[in-house]
Image (tube, rainbow, N blue to C red):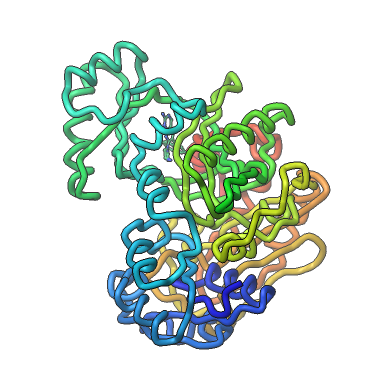
């Protein structure tokens, strides 16, 4: 096992990695920007290094500064958390060339799955269901028309270098196609420096369901069940739950098996997520693979009892994945609400001083947060200040515990999304578990404040 790990991140996920390191007896190195002088991850790490000014381009994305911090402190490995450098294949190569171990999959896997057109191809060849669409990228309009005619309208044009909802264009009739391809290509060129696009059949009312996987360096791979992530706004998830209220146990097994197939097709080692779209008729399709630990990993930990971040560190240090598929038994139901420093009605950011903070507790409640009373949320990074997770014997108990936890959270001085969550938890469609990726749009049209 490693003796010392550098955490190339901030906020609650930096604390989460410190928790796992402490459980394993690993010393930690925090890195921080000038905006994060008073951040909690500094306090709980054994050592810390300032890596630059507030803008993430000069700090949390500053590869030379982070590699130098690892070398100066004698860290052997780097945990990237999520966001920032977590899915940057070049960073992995630089780290490895400096004899630093990256806590995550190989640069090759990250690069392959970062190219969404190529990921589609790899999955199709592996026998993972993918949506009807183009065979790899489409560059000319004639090919695009052929593909569209074959699969039928509506279609969606996606950037190969995109993902997470960036660089997409929905096309509802053939006369929009030429313009959509051209616009998507030029937007992708500007946003990612790569104008490649591909085409898929567009599902109008799907659920977004993702499967957690773990793979090791010896070719073992398992899945840890799914998370229902359909409740999102502008591709930012708001509430997640595990398991999905939409799946039967037989569908869960089929989707889990497909996720393991995807893991094996990419020689996947470490923690990862396979995103699927679930159609009204029960069929599901590979959408993309996330080659990092995700924000919502904690609800999978609650229903499986598996410490995913601990396994990330163990796998990266060369341990064998001794957990077998039969050891993964889902227990009860977990829900996560992301607490953002933002106005609950307008969604405008609300950084500033947290005057009072009292996190909720009690049976079945887990709080992952780097907030404290007297902490000033900087305007520089994303607005998530923490996550409230609950676990119950069933969905109904989990919902009751989430209502209790959110209504007993004291977080004063800034606006937060807590009032929005409490409204969603009273929504009949949410309570029935009957919703799709269109939920938030419809909800915001019917909610009254
Ligand atoms: C789709 C889709 C329907 N059909 N692809 C959104 C995030 C990124 N991972 C891909 N996304 C989607 N891809 C096909 N072929 C629906 C989504 C989608 C979505 C689209 C528009 C508005 C909100 C959405 C929320 C979740 C998923």
For the point 63% across and 41% down, which residue is it? 226
Which quadrant of the structure image shows residue 163? top left
Which x, y percent locates residue 243? Answer: 69, 42
Which x, y percent locates residue 141? Answer: 17, 22
Q: In the drawing, does residue 298 fall left or right of residue 185?
A: right
Residue closer to the observer: 143 or 360: 143
For the point 55% across and 27% down, which residue is it? 284
Q: In the drawing, does residue 9 fall left or right of residue 329?
A: left
**Residue 334 showing in the rendered view:** yes
For the point 34% across and 62% down, which residue is it? 93
Which quadrant of the structure image shows residue 204? top left
The correct choice, above or below, for 376 with respect to 116 in the image is below
Q: Ligand 1, what quadrant? A: top left
Which x, y percent locates residue 56? Answer: 33, 71
Q: In the drawing, does residue 135 fall left or right of residue 100?
A: left
Which x, y percent locates residue 236? Answer: 46, 50
For the point 49% across and 37% down, which residue is it? 265
Q: Quadrant of the N terminus?
A: bottom right
**Residue 442 showing in the rendered view:** no
The correct choice, above or below, for 233 with respect to 88 in the image is above
């Amino acid at each position: 096992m490693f003796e010392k790990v550098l955490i190339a991140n901030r906020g609650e996920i930096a604390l989460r990695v410190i928790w796992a390191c402490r459980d394993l007896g690993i010393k930690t190195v925090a890195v921080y920007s000038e905006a994060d002088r008073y951040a909690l991850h500094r306090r709980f790490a054994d050592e810390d290094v300032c890596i630059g000014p507030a803008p993430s381009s000069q700090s949390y994305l500053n590869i030379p500064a982070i590699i130098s911090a690892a070398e100066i402190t004698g860290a052997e490995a780097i945990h990237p958390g999520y966001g920032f450098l977590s899915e940057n294949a070049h960073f992995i190569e630089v780290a490895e060339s400096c004899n630093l171990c990256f806590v995550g999959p190989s640069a090759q896997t990250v690069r392959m799955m970062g190219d969404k057109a190529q990921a589609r191809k790899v999955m199709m060849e592996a026998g993972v269901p993918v949506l009807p669409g183009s065979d790899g990228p489409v560059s000319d309009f004639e090919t695009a028309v052929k593909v569209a005619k074959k699969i039928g309208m509506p279609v969606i044009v996606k950037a190969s270098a995109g993902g997470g909802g960036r660089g997409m264009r929905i096309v509802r009739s053939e006369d929009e196609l030429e313009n959509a391809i051209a616009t998507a290509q030029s937007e992708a060129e500007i946003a990612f420096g790569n104008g490649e696009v591909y085409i898929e059949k567009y599902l109008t009312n799907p659920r977004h369901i993702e499967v957690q996987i773990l793979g090791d360096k010896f070719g073992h791979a398992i899945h840890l069940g799914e998370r229902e992530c359909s409740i999102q706004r502008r591709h930012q998830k708001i509430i997640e739950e595990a398991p999905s209220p939409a799946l039967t146990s037989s569908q869960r097994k089929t989707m889990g098996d497909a996720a393991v197939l995807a893991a094996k097709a990419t020689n996947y080692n470490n923690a990862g997520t396979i995103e699927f779209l679930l159609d009204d008729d029960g069929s599901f399709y590979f959408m993309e693979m996330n080659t990092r630990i995700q924000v919502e990993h904690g609800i999978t930990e609650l229903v499986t009892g598996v410490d995913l971040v601990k396994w990330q560190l163990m796998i990266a240090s060369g341990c064998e994945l001794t957990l077998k598929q039969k050891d993964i038994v889902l227990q009860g139901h977990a829900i996560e609400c992301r607490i953002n420093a933002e106005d609950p009605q307008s969604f405008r950011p609300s950084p500033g001083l947290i005057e009072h903070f009292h996190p909720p507790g009690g049976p079945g409640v887990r709080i992952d947060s780097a907030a404290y009373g007297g902490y000033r949320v900087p305007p520089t990074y994303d607005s998530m200040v923490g996550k409230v997770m609950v676990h119950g014997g069933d969905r109904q108990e989990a919902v009751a515990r989430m209502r209790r936890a959110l209504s007993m959270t004291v977080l004063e001085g800034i606006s937060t999304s807590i009032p929005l969550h409490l409204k969603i938890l009273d929504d009949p469609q949410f309570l029935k578990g009957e919703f799709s990726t269109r939920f938030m749009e419809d909800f915001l049209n019917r909610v009254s404040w």
